[in-house]
Amino acid sequence: MPAKSTAVSPTAASRRRLPTLVAATVLPALSLVGALTAGAGPAAAATSAGCTGGGFTVTLPSGTTVTPGTSTKVATTTMAADAVVKVRGRYVEFDVAPVTGNVVNYVYTGADNPMSMTPGVRTPVWASRTLDLGPVLRGEVEVRSDGSDLLLLSKGTGGKVKITAKDCATGGVFQQEAEAGRPVVATHTLAPGMYFYTNPFTGKVNAGNGTTFRGKDSPQSATRKSLNASVSVWEVASGGRMGFVTGEDAVELSAGATPCVQDCQAQNQLRGSVDVTDPAYRG
């Protein structure tokens, strides 16, 4: 497990790309403002425009596909632990192992959108987002693709994992929730080229790659246990969840979600409704 760190610095190569993406105590605030503002693209707020044309097609291990507007349920009793469901959208792609609830190879495709943070550039973000459940979800998996939204629910005698996602160029795009009757350890490993850093304008930990891309873990009823430049580890209460937000949602000055593990309401999440101080995402 990675050692604890209160401030996360990028690798040396990352510093060469964008030397200002470090904790505010390292460089004067004025130089940070100037460097981050120069060449920054338009603000990428979390609106429905960021989801235009979005929609997931899901391919099951059997080869069966679920297209937007359809759903299915499939038994996982004999499915291999490493078998994956392939989720492919216009803006976002990733794979899910239904028997463990683990997510791998989360990528932004770079598809054209005025709010894209990765225009024309295929950008791997997460190598994996894994849970410590093991192959216990041997019951069934439900897959439902509806517009730009996806629901993937795996159940078994050892608990259940619900994954919800949106096929959008920016905003609140992913959530992973586990119920196992005990706290679950979630380990999030960034893809090569991505790194965690302390945003000097918000004091929060963002994920970036030296461009205007901004991402952030969005916990609910979860406690961060450790953090280094590429891995964050969380202990999540049963029924709690780990989300992932990007763009303006990743840099807003919100207090975060309130504790909730059952019947959580939409108001537990703030989206684009508070001040944004990061120059890359100010209109």
Image (cartoon, rainbow, N blue to C red):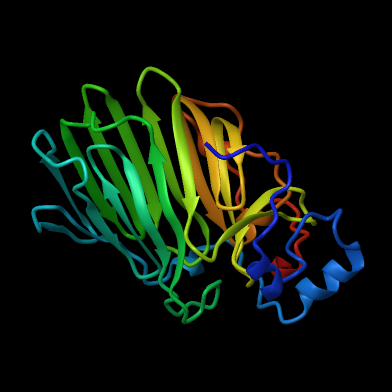
Residue farthest top in this picture: 181
Residue shown at the point (55%, 38%) measured from the top left: 219
Seen at 59% across and 34% down, the residue is 224
Give left or right: position of 230 versus 168: right
The residue under the point 33% across, 43% down is: 102
Q: Is residue 272 visible?
A: no
Residue nearest the viewer, comparing 102 with 74: 102
Q: Percent position (x, y) of residue 187?
A: 47, 40
Above or below, 86 against 222 in this view is below
Instruction: Locate residue 203 relative to residue 273 in the image: left or right.
Output: right
Asked if residue 206 is positioned above or below residue 270 in the image, the reply reads below
The total number of labels drawn is 0
Q: Position of residue 11 (x, y in %)?
A: 64, 62
In what quadrant of the picture does the C terminus appear?
bottom right
Q: Would residue 185 be visible to someone looking at this image? A: yes
Up-down relation of residue 216 to residue 110 (above or below): above
- Describe residue 86's horizontal placement relative to residue 191 as left or right: left
- Estimate the x, y position of residue 111 in percent, counting from the top left: 42, 77
Residue 181 sits in which quadrant?
top left
Q: What is the x, y in percent for residue 237?
A: 48, 24
Where residue 27 sits, quadrant-wise, is bottom right
Does 83 appear above or below 219? below
- Residue drawn at x 76%, y 52% as measured from the top left: 202
